[in-house]
Image (cartoon, coloured by chain):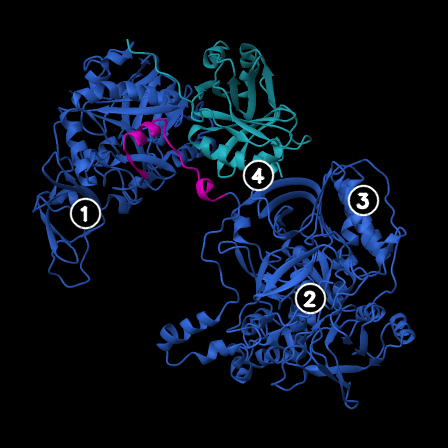
Chain colours: A cyan, B blue
Amino acid sequence: MAEQALRKAPLGGFNGGSAAAHVSAAAPATRLSLRAAPDAVAALSKALGLDLPTRPKTSASAKGQHALWLGPDEWLLIDEQGADLAAVAAKSGVLHSAVDVSHRNTAILVAGPKAAQAIASASPHDLSASAFPVGACARTVLGKIEVVIYRAGEQEYRVECWRSFSPYAFGVLAEGAEDAAH
Amino acid sequence: MSGANRIAGAGRLTPARTARFTFDGKSYEALEGDTVASALLANGVHLVGRSFKYHRPRGILSAGAEEPNALIDVERDAARKQPNVRATVQEVFDGATISSQNRWPSLAFDVGGINNLLSPFFAAGFYYKTFMWPKAAWEKFYEPRIRAAAGLGVAPTQADTDHYTNRFAHCDVLVVGAGVAGLSAALAAAETGARVILCDEQPEVGGALHYDKSVKIDGQDGFAWAQATAARLAAMDNVTVLTRTTAFGYYAQNFVVLAERVTEHLARPDRKLPRERMWQVRAKRVVLATGAIERHMVFANNDRPGVMLASAARTYLNHFGVAVGKKVGVYTANDSAYEAAFDLHRAGVRIAAIVDNRAKPGEGVLAEARSLGIEVLTGHSVIDTKGHRRVNSMTIARNGGGGKRTIAIDALIMSAGWTPSVHLFSQSRGKVAYNAETGQFLPGTYAQDCLSVGACNGTNGLQATVEEALAAGELMARATGSKAGGKVEIRAENAFEWTGGMAGAAEGAGANDNVKAFIDFQNDVCAKDIRLAVREGMHSIEHIKRFTTNGMATDQGKLSNIHGLAIAAETLGRDIPKVGLTTFRAPYTPVTYGTIINHSRGELFDPTRKTPMHAWEEAHGAVFEDVGQWKRAWYYPRAGETMHEAVSRECKTVRDVAGVFDASTLGKIEVVGPDAAEFLNLMYTNAWDTLKPGRCRYGIMLREDGYVYDDGVVGRIAEDRFHVTTTTGGAPRVMNHMEDYLQTEFPHLKVWLTSTTEQWAVIAVQGPKAREIIAPLVEGIDISNEAFPHMSVREGKICGVPTRLFRMSFTGETGFEVNVPADYGQAVWEAIWARAEPMGACAYGTETMHVLRAEKGYIIVGQDTDGTVTPFDAGVGWAVSKKKTDFVGIRGLKRPDLVAEGRKQLVGLKTKDPTVVLEEGAHIVADPNQPIPMKMLGHVTSSYWSSNCGHSIALALVAGGQARMGQTLYVPMPDRTIAVEVTDMVFIDKEGARLNG
């Protein structure tokens, strides 16, 4: 048997930004694109151990696992501990589509007092506390790419994007973080 | 004292804080806070530019963004050099290098001034009439010369070294303009707790308070109140106050775009700061408090340096402490000019006379003028001025004749009344309404959630303005659901209410066609030009504008539009509202390109997509090609190899040994659900329900019209799960196409689509030794030919990580496509390479991939097809199911012209001379000796040198091609005609032995 192949994240140790907004690559995580009709939500929620959100721009989190509402039948599940999310969802026994997108996506963390402003340099989404409280999420645009923005804390955002777009996303966010400092 | 015309004790600048700058090479001293205009006036410089057409000497007309004359070039260094900057807006900074424009050899002596003498030949519309003959001369003679003479400033030739940024912002209430009205509205809105953005184009808030010193608000000096109010607002968490920020565009759904000038005023800006910042604001409500712009009087030679707007002279005095002259004439049709005269008089400037076009000025200002001992001539006009580089006299006469006299002056200030700034309101698609009583176009019908307050709404009276603004600010904030706070009250008073105003030419403009009474200063449009336009048959204001160029300069007619309209209306004998206004368009004032593109430059201009193996490819000398946003390894030249040599070697190596290829960019879509096969049956021409799990099939996808849209191999992973591949370029549109049909046509199907393009790194291993290369790395999959034949797919492990292993080929060789989760791509590639290289295999790029597939006659959608090719035309009719009763494009395929004889069909071509490689795109004819234009049979779609065949190969779309096998056709080229033989599309291994090995 050959040696176990080593994992190489698209953003590696990217790290930057400013005192106003620190921009860094998130640690690897497992991710699942989950699709299901409304009648499957209860069983899936039970299997996953968190209530799949059913209102736009909301999420649910439990023990390092996050379920982000992306559409009426679509969620992005993220597990920072690396759980096999497809296997967990399969235990629900109800009809759904589970597709592993752990490597398709990568995430950039933007944190600091002006984190929202750094993202707002390229994203038209309203990130203010009233429109986008902690736990809010949205699939939207950042400059010329599509991203999912998740507000992890008062001053902490997770920006998910496809891996080949991540250097662009990082560049845009780093410039935004620099401008947010002034 | 910085400048002889600075008056001690006047103005708000600090005498001790000086800055030096040069204007046309001469050094001047300014005060911090000066604009270039105020600093030049302080130093007695009135001549600052030349007009566009006649090259007439011009001075500073205004003190704001509406300035048409004083355009300058501001230079920091060769790369940071900005032409056409308004001297009335640009703040002086220490070390600034300022130059005048549109003059040669110098501002004082300008050769182009000859145009002024030749002006009878340059009447309005001369451009359309004069250069008509001889016709050929337009292109060779007239146009190049006109182009050389046209334009004002000179653009820098070096790349801009500044950077620019962008911010999206959201608010409940956006208030545009921070004069009395804007500040009041912002305060009322902010007190409710609403999120407020207040912006103003000037460095300091205050608007008209810059010049109107008579204002007292809540017992305070007006300007001081404005600064205190702005500071109070800025300290509130829910308020953003932006100065030096122009709202320049008002778009749909209260989307307003602002340009913030961050460092334009700084001598040594921190390079981390952007030069400008664009703000894209989405506001729930907008309050427009954009004020009004004073109009000039229209009379003969009203454009001499030293002639300026009364409010401008008042601003220079009361804000900058600069007297615009020592003996100043006043010409007005409005009370506001009187107050300018009073302020100048009190500062010790002699007022030669107030010449009032009206019979009855406002009583208050008239009485005050008399008590100050200023001569007022009512019912009089200024009919001419003299003075070359600066006005030195005005000639006045009684309206209706008589009383003519000439008065020596060194400045002439004027006011024809005020034009409400309805630009943004109009951009918002609001409709203006004409108020005949005041002669103003005012906001009429609103199209968006905004309100206009104060002068831009035609509101007269300071207290009325404050109350209107407070009410609007609160109303708009409450409408967004903001509930806090109570009523804000502000008491404001000023010296005089203003009356009067006129539009169009006063008596002094004359009926004479030689009199130059300017309405548009920058474009040299006079009252007579408007009259000429009407005489020549232009009756629409839009035609008059374009015929005369009135309002088409960089100031966009801020001063001239109303005058032009009034003169046109008078000449046409129609009412002003019947003639109508021209359209207001963004931007309100010029915006630099850097601001608009902001961070979209260099690396961030567009995303550059790289595969997980990119770093390895780069390290191994790959040359990359752009495929959409992707960088793909094109070929791997060894030392000294040309592209041709490298590709020939790679092609041969793959067929002789093996090759490794990065296919990660191929589009991938996971189709999951119990109806997945049924859905694919509808999307592709092929049948999918018959495909067994573990097997793959090449699929063709059509558009509704029956033409080929995309193709790719689809693997069935499980009963309810397919792994679809698309072309690299087709990935996003195929996903959209499928999702569109799923949601609109087939919503009853239980199936979901997920893009997995980037989930998988794809390593194609192709060639006779492909199996041997990967065999020891694979676990859990029997990859023998028997267990894993061509067009199979299995899940298992490679190098200890999960893989979807495909047995497939785009080369015609035994081939595998190793799909691994993308983060493992490079490590697995390296493991494969470690086995492949010692066996003599190579890494190959997209060029070799193209040649190898052409040798096998495999098409590339988009290269061999062009959106008018059916599967039958492309020679893949076998992929169209005859049993299915429905799929996208099934009816299109039955259209008469799609089944007609003689359609262009894809065939192979072999050149008679095997060494000749055809040009892709070259046309094909049957008879090369026929007269031109020849009848084209088709064109070459793919053409390569094939080192494996030892001759060139080509694919071509040829009319009736499949019936022409063996025929000789011709490809006419500029230097020769190439004979070709029509062949089958497969050039190598026709029986497919290698594929199935």
Label 3 neighbour load within 10 Å: few <14, some 14-19, many 20+:
many
User: In the image, is B120 to the left or to the right of B292?
Assistant: left
Q: CA distance from mark 3 to mark 2?
A: 32 Å
Dot in front, 1 or 2: 2
Q: Residue B38 sits in which quadrant?
A: bottom right
Q: Residue B545 sits in which quadrant?
A: bottom right
Discs 4 and 1 lie in a common subunit: no
Residue position marked by numbered label 3 in the rendering: B188
Callouts 2 and 4 close, C-beta under 8 Å: no
Residue extending furthest toward the bottom: B402
Residue position marked by numbered label 2 in the rendering: B62
Residue B615 within the segment the image draws in magenta: yes
User: In the image, is B931 to the left or to the right of B879?
Assistant: left
B214 in relation to A86, above or below? below
Residue position marked by numbered label 4 in the rendering: A121
Mark identifier at residue B881:
none
Label 4 neighbour load within 10 Å: few <14, some 14-19, many 20+:
many
Pointer 2 chain: B
Q: CA distance from mark 4 to mark 3?
A: 29 Å
Discs 3 and 1 lie in a common subunit: yes
Residue sitting nearer the eye, A143 or B149 = B149
Dot in front, 4 or 1: 4
Whether residue B428 is visible: yes
Residue sitting nearer the eye, B728 or B931 = B728
A129 in relation to B256, above or below? above
Q: Earlier in the sequence, mark 3 or mark 2?
A: 2
Dot in front, 3 or 1: 3
Question: Judging from the image, what secondary structure is the residue with disc 3 in?
Answer: helix
Q: Which residues are magenta?
A: B600-625
- Please tell me which residue is depicted at 21% across the width and 49% down the height of the picture: B939
What percent of the width, then of the height, locates residue B365?
87, 71
Residue position marked by numbered label 1 in the rendering: B958
